[in-house]
Image (cartoon, grey):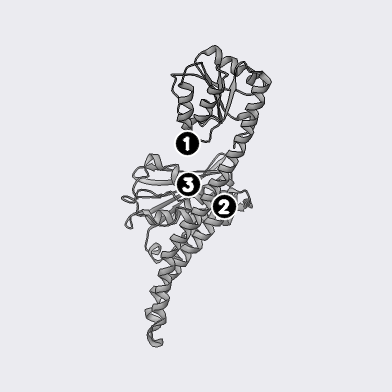
């Protein structure tokens, strides 16, 4: 939500002199209105001003038409509109209010009244924006729970099926028959645990409740351990070629559990989207002031318009080229965790590879 001093006012008038006359007392009160003439085009749904003051000349219906247009769409319907009218008659006031105006002010108008009414409407607008932000936050939390529950159903069903199969095996034959179902169940439970942790920690990172505990750690060792752990959990990963390249590095300061989750999520992402017959490449290097971690796979390139959005919760790539898998929480967690370390993360398409790049301060 914008601070009161940063709220945007829009003044629309027929003449530049009239727009300036309405704007002057507001400027003296610390406001910075944007002036427009009728006939000029502006995307109000995009700009979303916090208050619109429209000057209405006697006998001119354009101010009422603009008011109706603003109030007719959900994108601008809650923006307060004040009609400042030359015609001070009761008929003109009624017409303005019927067109949807929130206030009607006849000319001549005292500067103090204009400023007071403007400030009153802006205070109400601040409260509306706070309610909108709260509603968006509640909707996001609801969506997170819905998507998490939806994506947990698949690994949970697989685990139940495998355990039911194990329960039906005769004791003498069980040892040989249950190895594969047990391994599949372990992977499924790992996926559920990871999704739950990502959901909870995304929320805590956004709220500033989860702060990294920075300690000196070996990033290359952490990467190697993450690869070994993924191979121990996932039989498919054990069959994949994963190459870690790095020169000797000095110790870096980061939160080891958080960074292990980040590397694990990116590794799972590379295993998921990269072809099984092509290696996954992981490079770690340190430059003056920054350390870089790159995890690359040979999967389909990420579209330019999705390179930022894939780090948002629940964003999935095109199913025609990227088989959907997971709730879309892992990359969102990675970005929040890296930002909490004062670092950066991005994805690039380079030399036939999809490369996720992490930058950390040294």
Q: Tell me the crowding category of disc 3: few under 14, some 14 to 19, or many 20 or more residues within 10 angstroms, Cα based.
A: some
Which comes sooner in the sequence, label 1 or label 3? 1
Location of mark 1 (residue): 75
Label 3 and label 2: CA atoms lie apart by 13 Å
Give the tally of numbered discs. 3
Which comes sooner in the sequence, label 3 or label 2? 2
210 horizontally vs 181: left or right: right
Q: Is residue 273 above or below residue 81?
A: below
User: Residue 11 placed where, x, y %?
Assistant: 54, 22
* Residue at left offset 45%, top offset 28%: 43
Which comes sooner in the sequence, label 2 or label 1? 1
Label 2 and label 1: CA atoms lie apart by 28 Å
Residue that protrudes farthest toward the right in the picture: 112
Q: Which mark is residue 203?
A: 2
197 horizontally vs 355: left or right: right
Locate the C terminus and report the quarter of the image it occupies.
top right
Cβ atoms at labels 3 and 2 below 8 Å apart: no
Q: Nearer the viewer, mark 2 or mark 1?
A: 1
Q: Nearer the viewer, residue 236 or 101?
A: 101
Label 1 and label 3: CA atoms lie apart by 23 Å
Q: Is residue 166 visible?
A: yes
User: Residue 26 placed where, x, y %?
Assistant: 63, 21
Location of mark 3 (residue): 312
Q: Tell me the crowding category of disc 2: few under 14, some 14 to 19, or many 20 or more residues within 10 angstroms, Cα based.
A: some
User: Which type of secondary structure does the marked residue at label 1 adopt?
Assistant: loop
User: Which type of secondary structure does the marked residue at label 3 adopt?
Assistant: loop
Q: Nearer the viewer, residue 265 or 285?
A: 265
41 horizontally vs 104: left or right: left
* Residue at left offset 38%, top offset 86%: 170
Q: Is residue 214 above or below residue 235?
A: above
């Amino acid at each position: 939500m914008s601070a009161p001093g940063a709220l945007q006012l829009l003044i629309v008038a027929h003449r530049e002199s009239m727009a300036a006359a309405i704007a002057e007392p507001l400027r003296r009160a610390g406001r910075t209105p944007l002036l427009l003439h009728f006939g000029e085009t502006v995307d109000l749904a995009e700009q979303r001003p916090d208050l619109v003051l429209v000057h209405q000349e006697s006998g001119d219906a354009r101010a009422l038409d603009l008011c109706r247009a603003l109030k007719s769409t959900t994108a601008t319907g809650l923006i307060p509109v004040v009609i400042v009218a030359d015609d001070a008659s009761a008929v003109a006031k009624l017409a303005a209010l019927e067109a949807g105006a929130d206030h009607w002010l006849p000319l001549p108008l005292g500067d103090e009244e204009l400023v007071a009414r403007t400030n009153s409407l802006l205070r109400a607008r601040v409260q509306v924006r706070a309610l909108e932000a709260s509603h968006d936050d509640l909707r996001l939390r609801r969506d997170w729970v819905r998507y998490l529950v939806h994506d947990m159903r698949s690994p949970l069903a697989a685990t139940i099926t495998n355990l039911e199969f194990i329960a039906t095996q005769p004791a003498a034959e069980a040892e040989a028959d249950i190895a594969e179902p047990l391994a599949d169940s372990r992977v499924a439970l790992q996926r559920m645990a990871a999704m739950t942790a990502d959901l909870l920690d995304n929320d805590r990172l956004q709220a500033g409740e989860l702060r990294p505990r920075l300690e000196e750690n070996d990033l290359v060792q952490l990467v190697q351990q993450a690869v070994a752990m993924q191979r121990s959990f996932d039989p498919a990963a054990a069959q994949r070629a994963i190459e870690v390249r790095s020169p000797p590095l000095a110790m870096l300061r980061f939160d080891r559990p958080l960074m292990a989750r980040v590397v694990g999520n990116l590794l799972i992402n590379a295993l998921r989207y990269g072809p099984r017959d092509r290696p996954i490449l992981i490079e770690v290097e340190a430059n003056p002031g920054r350390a870089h971690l790159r995890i690359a796979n040979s999967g389909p390139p990420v579209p330019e318009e999705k390179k930022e959005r894939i780090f948002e919760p629940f964003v999935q790539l095109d199913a025609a080229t990227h088989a959907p898998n997971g709730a879309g929480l892992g990359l969102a967690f990675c970005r929040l965790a890296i930002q909490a370390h004062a670092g950066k993360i991005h994805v690039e398409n380079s030399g036939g590879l999809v490369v996720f790049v992490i930058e950390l301060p040294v």
